[in-house]
Image (spheres, grey):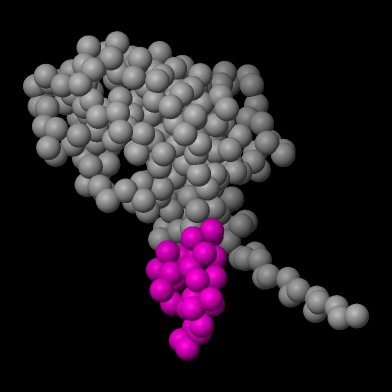
């Protein structure tokens, strides 16, 4: 009877942990002395941490074509799948870091930020999204979009095609309750969404459907919610499967930076 050899334990980096903790404490003291609130300090540090993880993800992605020379097609395929898995996990970690900081920022100061099993939670990716889920989310997005724009002249087939991809950035744990999550997001951001469509949507002052069709489509509500929740994850699934990177880039600029009074 054959036995598998004992797997070698991977080495952990144990050099920068204490240095980073001391640096974070010093930055916190300086920012608070300058008048920043604890919530703002926490959010800023989380953004820096997420940026570092995103940088690591960029380094990992560079390895997608660097399988050992002379390897078989199977080895190359396995190598690519491994790189993709690591890159996806790093994206989840970066998004989680920012999301938890933003959540903590709205919790009263008397409520400690939770630590323990929940703080280590990683969302479970989905390989595909069923058509029933796509249609349910689209129906909710249509209701929101029409209530804000009055427009019903959109391409429903295109909506389903895009949502089939975009909804892959919703974790398996959140799929079932995502319609409610989307509706809550729309209620909380109704004014901001109204500004977006009033400026760039159907009949808007700066509408240009040829450059950014998303502002004329109901699935844009879902894209806005995902941009505010898991932007890097959304970018990952979008850029992997939709041949429209500039569309998302332009829409992101509209949503994040284009709503100030012109």
x then y, percent, for residue 169: 46, 40
Question: Magenta residues?
Answer: 59-86
Q: Please tell me whether residue 253 is drawn above or below residue 191 in the rendered image.
A: below
Q: Which quadrant would residue 258 be assigned to in this image?
A: top left
Residue at screen point 20% across, 21% down: 153
Specify the farthest residue to the right: 1
Q: Please tell me whether residue 61 is drawn above or below residue 174 in the rendered image.
A: below
x then y, percent, for residue 196: 23, 23
x then y, percent, for residue 70: 47, 88
Specify the farthest residue to the bottom: 70
Specify the farthest residue to the left: 205
32 left or right of 172 in image: left
Q: Which quadrant would residue 192 be assigned to in this image?
A: top left
Looking at the picture, tell me which residue is in the foreground, 234 or 151: 151
Residue at screen point 58% across, 61% down: 16
Which secondary structure type mostly characterizes the magenta part of the structure? Answer: helix
138 left or right of 246 in image: right
Asked if residue 24 is among those painted magenta in the image, a careful observer would answer no
211 left or right of 154 in image: left
Looking at the picture, tell me which residue is in the foreground, 116 or 29: 116
């Amino acid at each position: 009877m054959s036995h598998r050899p004992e797997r070698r334990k991977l080495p952990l980096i144990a050099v920068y942990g204490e240095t980073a903790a001391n640096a974070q404490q010093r930055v916190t003291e300086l920012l608070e002395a300058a008048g920043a609130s604890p919530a703002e300090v926490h959010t800023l540090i989380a953004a820096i941490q997420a940026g570092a993880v995103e940088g690591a993800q960029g380094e990992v992605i560079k390895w997608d074509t660097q399988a050992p020379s002379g390897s078989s097609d199977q080895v190359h395929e396995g190598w690519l799948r491994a790189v993709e898995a690591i890159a996806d996990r790093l994206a989840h970690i970066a998004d989680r870091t920012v999301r938890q900081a933003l959540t903590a920022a709205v919790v009263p100061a008397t409520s400690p930020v939770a630590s323990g099993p929940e703080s280590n939670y990683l969302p479970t990716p989905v390989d595909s999204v069923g058509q029933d889920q796509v249609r349910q989310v689209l129906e909710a997005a249509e209701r929101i979009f029409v209530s804000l724009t009055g427009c019903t002249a959109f391409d429903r087939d295109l909506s389903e095609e895009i949502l089939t991809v975009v909804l892959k950035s919703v974790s398996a744990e959140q799929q079932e309750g995502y319609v409610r999550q989307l509706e809550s997001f729309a209620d909380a951001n109704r004014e901001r969404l109204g500004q977006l469509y009033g400026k760039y949507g159907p009949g808007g002052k700066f509408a240009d459907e040829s450059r950014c069709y998303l502002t004329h489509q109901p699935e844009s509500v879902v894209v806005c919610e995902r941009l505010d929740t898991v932007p890097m994850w959304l970018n990952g699934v979008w850029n992997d499967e939709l041949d429209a990177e500039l569309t998302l880039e332009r829409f992101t600029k509209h949503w994040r930076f284009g709503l100030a009074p012109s």
